[in-house]
Amino acid sequence: MIRIEEAGGVLVLTLNRPQVMNALNAPLRRALLEAITGATARVIVLTGAGRGFCAGQDLAEVDPATVDLEAVLREEYEPLIRAIAEAPMPVIAAVNGVAAGAGANLALACDVVIAAESAKFVQAFARIGLVPDAGGSWLLPRQIGMARAMGAMLFAEAVPARQAADWGMIYEAVPDADFAGHWRGRAESLARGPALALGATKRLLRGSFGRSLAEQMAAEAAAQAICGADGDFREAVAAFLDKRVPVFR
Ligand code: T3D
């Protein structure tokens, strides 16, 4: 269901059902959740095998007459999206091709989204008479504003990677020829970084939507106290003064 490779602090999880554009069935959801919650790497990358990233729910698995959609979402999708948001390390989505439905929102739940220029994001739910799920109705208006999120979700049109980057839905769109080397370089650069500070930055930003400015600054101060007492801070300052590249733990 997924290919798992780990090297140099980077855990790469490749969704591996290319014959159905890596559509999510129950075994794939379980494998992904286990791999993310069990990860000890410094960075996780999610990507897809073949020409798609993920086509969302495997529609061949669902019998609309009997499926309990609420239970599937509460018991399988929600833990997966929360596992990404709550993972102590940064999670990168390397979106190699189309990301549709819950597959789009799986990508958008990641901390950094890097897409190949030929990739596209489709909030496909309205096409099949469903509402956006897997956290998308919370994430997308925060990422691109209400007007664009509403349009993307009501019209269920594909948003090309370049436009997604221009809108702030993703971090960057990269020419296809450079894509694989580029996301790997990004992941390795985070893996060489100060893990404690990067994890704390993720938590601060993700927690910020539920806090006032005063509460957020208190959270910053508390996190800075922890990072400031850490060896990585001492090493980085010493490296700066010595005019050398810091070596983080
Ligand atoms: O059910 C619940 O528990 C609730 C949760 C719902 C969450 C959701 O994700 S709802 C949204 C589900 N996803 C979709 O509606 C997307 C359906 N797929 C598409 O619209 C298109 O396939 C794509 C835009 C993703 C890609 O189009 P294209 O033209 O590049 O490829 P294709 O030819 O349509 O697909 C290639 C193969 O993948 C094809 O199989 P075949 O004909 O070669 O044997 C196609 O049937 C299969 N495939 C694509 N998406 C899915 C899928 N098979 C099962 N489930 C899919 N979602």
Image (cartoon, rainbow, N blue to C red):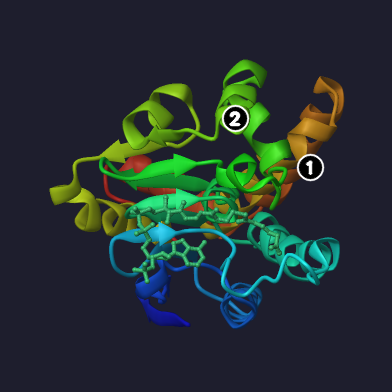
Numbered label attached to residue 143: 2
Q: Nearer the viewer, residue 187 or 151?
A: 151
Q: Nearer the viewer, residue 57 or 235?
A: 57
Q: CA distance from mark 2 to mark 1?
A: 26 Å
Q: Looking at the image, is mark 2 or mark 1 nearer the viewer?
A: 2
Q: Earlier in the sequence, mark 2 or mark 1?
A: 2
Q: Write the residue at 63% across / 20% down.
A: 145
Answer with left or right where residue 157 lies relative to residue 210. Answer: left
Q: Position of residue 139 (x, y in %)?
A: 66, 38
**Height in image: 215 above or below 244?**
above
**Height in image: 133 above or below 67?**
above
**Height in image: 13 above or below 81?**
below
Q: Write the residue at 42% across / 81% down.
A: 4
> Which residue is identified by label 1?
222
Numbered label attached to residue 78: none
Q: Is residue 249 visible?
A: no
| Kind of residue sitting beneath label 1 | Ala
Q: Nearer the viewer, residue 238 or 46?
A: 46
Residue 26 lies in quadrant: bottom right
Q: Position of residue 75 (x, y in %)?
A: 81, 70
Answer with left or right where residue 153 lies relative to residue 93. Answer: right
